[in-house]
Image (tube, grey):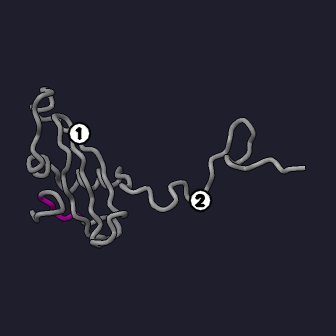
Amino acid sequence: MAKGRGGAMRGFKGPDGTSWGVEVKMPTASNSMVVFHHPGSRSSRLDRYAWHHWHGPEARSVTSRVLPETVMKTLGDDALELLFRRSMPISAGKSPLSGQRAMSTATGKADGDMEPRD
C-alpha cells in the first residue's frame, strides 16, 4: 500500500478505467469513510466518498476505534466496486444544482424571481 494524502492508500480501477487511490478516513467503532482520490493531483474536486459499515468486535463498543489499516485489509475488489457505485462527490462543484433554481411551492415561480413593477 502506498502512503496517500493522509494515510495508507491502495489502487482501484473504476468502471471507466480510471485508476483511483483509495484511503480509509475517520474510522469509528462501527463505520469509516472510504475516499476515492481522483488520479489528477489538481483535481481533488473529483474525489468521491462512501461510508463503510464495520461489523467486527469493535462495533459493539462505543469507546473502541477500528484502525484504518484493518478496514483497508478487509476491503476486497468486490467491496470497493460496491462502495464506488454508492459513492458521492466530495465537492459540490461550481453549480450544485446544475444551474437550476429551486421552485417555490407557494408561487410556482423560481425562488428569487420578482414580480414585474407597474
Is disc 1 placed on a helix, strand or loop?
A: strand
- The picture places residue 72, in percent across and down from the top left corner, at 13, 51
Residue at x 68% of width, y 41% of height? 104
Quadrant of the snapshot with the N terminus:
bottom left
Snapshot quadrant of residue 39: bottom left
Which is nearer the N-term, disc 2 or disc 1?
Answer: 1
Q: Which residue is at the front of the view, 50 or 13?
A: 50
The answer to whether 101 appears left or right of 15 in the picture is right
Residue 70 appears left or right of 103:
left
* Crowd around label 2: few <14 · some 14–19 · many ≥20 (10 Å): few
Residue count near mark 1 (Cα–Cα under 10 Å), binned few <14, some 14–19, many ≥20 = some
Mark 1 lies on residue: 53
Residue at 36% from the left image edge and 55% from the top image edge: 90
Residue 36 position by quadrant: bottom left
Q: Position of residue 53 (x, y in %)?
A: 23, 39
Q: Amino acid at mark 1?
A: His
Q: Is residue 81 above or below residue 70?
A: below
User: What number is the disc on residue 6?
Assistant: none
* Direction from residue 80 to residue 9 in the image, left or right: left
Q: Is residue 11 magenta?
A: yes
Q: Secondary structure at mark 2?
A: loop
Majority SS type along the magenta span: strand
What residue span does the magenta drawing correspond to?
8-12
**At 16% across and 57% down in the image, what residue appears?**
6
Expressed as whole percent of the image width and height from the top left, the position of residue 68 reads 12, 48
Between 47 and 42, the one lying in front of the other is 42
Residue under the point 32% across and 64% down: 44
Q: Tell me which amino acid carries mark 2.
A: Gly
x and y percent of residue 66 in the render? Answer: 11, 40
Of the residues tagged 2 and 1, which is closer to the observer? 2
Which residue position is annotated with label 2? 99
* 45 drawn magenta: no
